[in-house]
Image: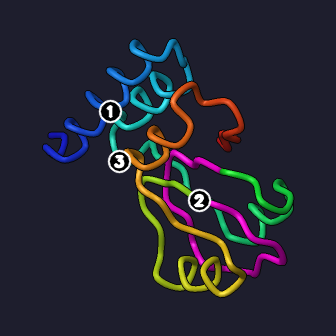
């Protein structure tokens, strides 16, 4: 059974996709509705390898705090560990919600989707 918060988030993402003609939000909605066992995990050091300074990153899964990141990013994910969030904030980055990300990047341009 899917959590009501996840269902509400998926509806918001699909609505933003249709309204702004942005397929990235529909894709994230599909990821959100998958069973939790099928969701991915990524370590912070891997995000650091795949991104550059000041990137806006979306990861449809859980971000774990293993490793370190040497630049600032803006991160949005389904779930994030406390240690990962702390490390991102220490480097001057941000951890934002999906609604904040949709407001700032309605068409999805400039957003890097990992996964």
Give the number of the mark in front: 2 or 3.
2
Q: Quadrant location of residue 42?
A: bottom right
Q: Secondary structure at mark 2?
A: strand
Residue 92, horizontal then vertical, whole percent: 68, 79
> Which residue is disc 2 drawn over?
75
Characterize the local packing of mark 1: few (<14), some (14-19) or many (20 or more) Cα atoms within 10 angstroms.
Answer: some
Q: Which residues are magenta?
A: 57-74
> Which residue is disc 1 drawn over?
33
Separation (CA) of disc 1 from disc 3: 8 Å
Residue depicted at x 54% and y 17%: 23
Separation (CA) of disc 2 from disc 1: 20 Å
Characterize the local packing of mark 3: few (<14), some (14-19) or many (20 or more) Cα atoms within 10 angstroms.
Answer: few
Give the number of the mark in front: 1 or 3.
1
The image's mark for residue 36 is 3
Quarter of the image that includes the N terminus: top left
Q: Is residue 102 magenta?
A: no
């Amino acid at each position: 059974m899917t959590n009501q918060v996840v269902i509400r988030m998926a509806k918001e993402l699909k609505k933003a996709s249709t309204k702004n003609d942005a397929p990235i939000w529909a894709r994230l909605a599909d990821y959100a509705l998958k069973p939790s066992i099928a969701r991915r995990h990524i370590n912070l050091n891997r995000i650091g390898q795949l991104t550059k300074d000041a990137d806006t990153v979306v990861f449809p899964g859980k971000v774990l705090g293993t490793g370190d990141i040497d630049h600032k990013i803006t991160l949005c994910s389904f779930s994030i560990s406390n240690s990962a969030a702390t490390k991102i904030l220490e480097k001057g980055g941000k951890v934002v919600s999906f609604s904040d990300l949709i407001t700032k990047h309605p068409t999805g341009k400039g957003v890097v989707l990992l996964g």
